[in-house]
Image (spheres, grey):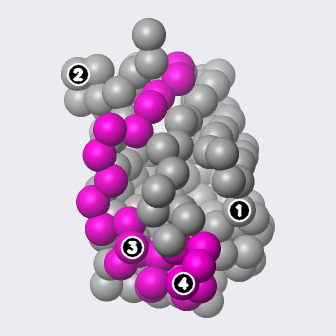
Amino acid sequence: MPVDYSGTWDIVSNVNFEGYMVALGIDFATRKIASMLKPQKVIKQDGDCFTIKTFTTFKNYESLFKIGEEVKEVTKGMDNRSCLTVVNWKNDKLVCVQKGEKKNRGWTHWIHGDELHLELTCEDQVCKQIYKRAL
């Protein structure tokens, strides 16, 4: 049985977010605002169905998916691009591949102890974020 990702998670580390946003083509002003934010993720998992909500004081983003099902997604709240998105299990990791205008785009989530790790990739950039479970 895969790990349960359900819970509320607060960001504690955000490495190379600027480089990732540049690769996405996000404008300078939005990057400066986004770099100051402290996102919180709320994840609800029901078997292979997920809802991941990301909350900030600037923009919120919601992602709904079922493992193995490809969906057309518009990345509202990020770079507003359309892509085909599929998330699969790789052992206890959630691995997302987003096919579209940008190459090598996607993310990987995994849990280690009381930390939720997230690696965001776009082209040659990798952003590494760590979240702690909220009490």
Residue 104, visible in the rendered structure: no
Please tell me which residue lies in front, 60 or 122: 60
- Disc assigned to residue 113: 2
Q: Is residue 100 left or right of residue 116?
A: right
Look at the numbered disc 2 and give the secondary structure of its residue: loop
Q: Would you say the residues marked 1 and 4 are in contact, meaning their CB atoms lie under 8 Å apart?
A: no
Please tell me which residue lies in front, 12 or 44: 12
Marked residue nearer the N-terminal end (1 or 2): 1
Look at the numbered disc 3 and give the secondary structure of its residue: helix
Tell me: residue 49, above or below residue 81: above
At label 1, which amino acid type do we have?
Gly
Farthest residue, direction left: 113
Quadrant of image for the C terminus: top left
At label 2, which amino acid type do we have?
Gly
Q: Residues within 10 Å of mark 4 (few under 14, many from 20)?
A: few
At label 3, which amino acid type do we have?
Glu
Q: Was residue 70 drawn as part of the magenta stretch in this picture?
A: no
According to the picture, the residue beneath numbered tag 3 turns out to be 18
Tell me which residue sits at (45%, 85%) in the image. 23
Tell me: residue 41, above or below residue 76: above
Q: Was residue 22 drawn as part of the magenta stretch in this picture?
A: yes
According to the picture, the residue beneath numbered tag 1 turns out to be 77
Tell me which residue sits at (48%, 44%) in the image. 38
Tell me which residue sits at (71%, 78%) in the image. 81
Q: CA distance from mark 4 to mark 3?
A: 10 Å
**Image spot of residue 90 (x, y percent):** 35, 46
Q: CA distance from mark 4 to mark 2?
A: 36 Å
